Amino acid sequence: MRKDRKTNLASILFSAGLIGLVAGPASAETLDGRVLAGGKPVAGSTVTLWAAGAGAPQQLAQAQTDADGHFAFSSAGAAGQDASLYVVARGGHSGADKTSGDNPALALLTVVGAKPPSHVTINEMTTVASVWTHAQFIDGSDVKGHALGLRIAAGNVPNFVDLATGGYGGMIQGDLNSTQTPTMANFATLSNVLAGCATRVKARACDDLFAAATGRTGVAPADTLAAAASIAHDMGYKPDRVFALLDAFYPVPKGKNLRETPYMPYLSVAPSAWVLPLKFAGGGYTGGAKVMFDSKGNAWSGANFIVGSQGQDSLWDGNMAEYASDGRPLSPMTKGFSGGGLQGPGFGTAIDANDRVWINSTSGKTISLFDNKGQPLSPPEGYNFGGKLGFMQGVIVTPGGDVWAVDFTNDRVVFMPKGDPSKAKFYCEAPAGTPNKDGPCKLNAPFHLVIDQQDRIWIDSAIGDHVTRFPASDPSKVEVFSSGGHSGKGMAVDSKGNVWVTNTLGSGLTVETDVRLLATKLTGGSLPAMDQIALGDLLSHPGLGSVSVLHPDGTPVAGSPFNPTGSIWGAWAVSIDGNDHAWISNFAPDGGLTELCGARTETCPSGMKMGDAISPPGGWKGGGMQMLVDASIDPAGNVWASNNWQDPKACYGTNEANSTRCGGQGMTVFYGMAKPVKSPQIGPAQLW
């Protein structure tokens, strides 16, 4: 390696104020690499090393590639937590380019993070991996954002691509993703299209790419990096245009069956959107439920069932799982985190300001508390207050540190001031001799709850079409509002104080189903038997389900409840991102995420109003999704969807062959799609 191709970074890091962020001794280490386009070396490319942070990125070094595409920097070690390094290659001539001269439209990116390897590759695949994971932090060719978000985004790049070789990363080509989802083909197709311009496979290849990548803003990109970012910023906008370039750039040769593309596999049919979701499993996670993030961006979630068990709806026996922000399971295999009275958690998981996890049990009929290492802090029997609890569902922590939870079985609310179980109180109880569901709160199988900006508690009911509200300071001042939809499940509060409620059964069950449910109840049928009847109705009516939005005063927003384009089916959870967009998970075959325009319409595509669908007509698809119950947004803008059930027949049947297939498999993560929010989320979502 020639000395004139090396740039000493020790002095540059010092002058840029980054030397204090260097991890380990400031000994000179060489960061070398290679720029490839279409699988061939790019000569004469200008390669620049940048440090990303909250402000404008800082240029640290620059070099030119030689005839073999090689470059090298002399660095002072790996950057610390608050600086994420990335490398941009601009211009040059690829060995795969049959024309002559520099290609000014060639621009490629590799994000290496705080601890780069000694050797990196910059090519189309590293560009796609870096752009999609950093979609919420990339502006033109600049990468900038808050430290946690940048760390999470950089940590996920290796899931897609090997930084050293520029080939596939371990997760995308692993068992859960390579043959089970279209993500790999989406990824390679995007890389091939970028390569078409980078290697100028035809005279107007770059012009064609820029036209196809132009988003709703009408601003055309001017290089391959900008084209990738434009697609990633509007993944569902006219995806067929980019797909058409595959045939335009790489037609099937006469007498052949396959296209001669730089990367395999490629798509055979146009996608509904250029999404790149990945699926993760392990850590004792099956039948995933509510997902919450701690201050490090790690995901915590209850699991309905024990991995490998013949789980059925009649008994939820699972524990709790934790995943690192890059999808690695951190909880023990098979059993996950257990103890503290936890058994069969449902939709109740919350994380407090000390990163402790509050989680409710259905079968265990308890409230449990764990520290951030997964060790139980609650006693072996949990907090059950002398056996007074039934099946527990939603739980929240308020900004003041109080803990509220709903008792699904007994139609009441549990309050623990400052999280102190010794001072627990019960609310929404009816006078003696009267069922709680007929009391002032009208709770009927309460499922979830939220607190708004005015410190008011809102609660929905799985049986009914209403929500209940009272001031946290005085639960006796109860108000009940119609939600306009049936079977409330998830809830969220946006920045304007509007309350979003998912209605799993939308306009309601058919009369025939209601009659069957009544007959089953009168003849002593079990709750699982009744669940099976209701689920059968839901699954036989695609598009059944909706989301309601109530103003802070309890009146419905115009047009509520919403189910635009029929993309909502079995709505279960709703999360609000930093742009006030609403993300709805669907408890339906193959899942599906529905993204709706929210209260701040200026953040939505032009012309959209509140409740309009931003996602494609069938919702965001892919990633091996199954029947979902949650969609949660992490600090990097990734949307985590928990696969709750996969085969309803297994949840009720006795067929040995599929007897372990009730609980859904793992978690599906959609990268860079939502405006990031702070974690842990305590109260309404807050923009970073």
Image (spheres, rainbow, N blue to C red):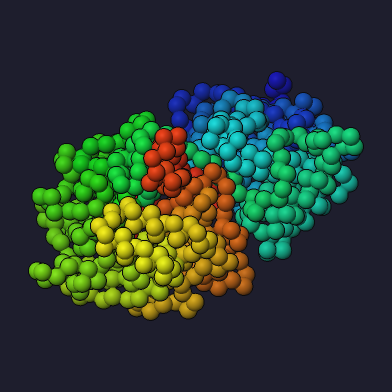
Instruction: Name which quarter of the figure residue 439 lies in.
Output: bottom left
Between residue 52 and residue 363, name the one nearer to us. Answer: 363
- Is residue 147 visible in the rendered structure shown here? no
Q: In this view, does 457 lie above or below 31?
A: below
User: Dividing the image into 4 quarters, which one contains the C terminus?
Assistant: bottom left
Residue at point 73%, 44% (across, down): 268
- Residue 364 lies left or right of residue 204; in this view the side is left
Residue 135 percent across, percent down from the top left: 58, 50
**What residue is drawn where x is 35% and y is 35%?**
309
Q: Nearer the viewer, residue 532 or 440?
A: 532
Quadrant location of the N terminus in the rendered image: top right
**Number of marks:** 0
Identify the residue at image location x=72%, y=63%. Answer: 218
Percent of width and height locating residue 98: 88, 36
Q: Is residue 251 left or right of residue 602?
A: right
Say which residue appears at 39% left-offset and 59% top-offset: 534
Note whether residue 235 is visible: yes
For residue 538, above or below residue 360: below
Q: Of residues 23 and 148, which is closer to you in this image?
A: 148
Q: Please tell me whether residue 159 is drawn above or below residue 641 in the rendered image.
A: above
Residue 648: image x %, image y %?
Answer: 43, 48
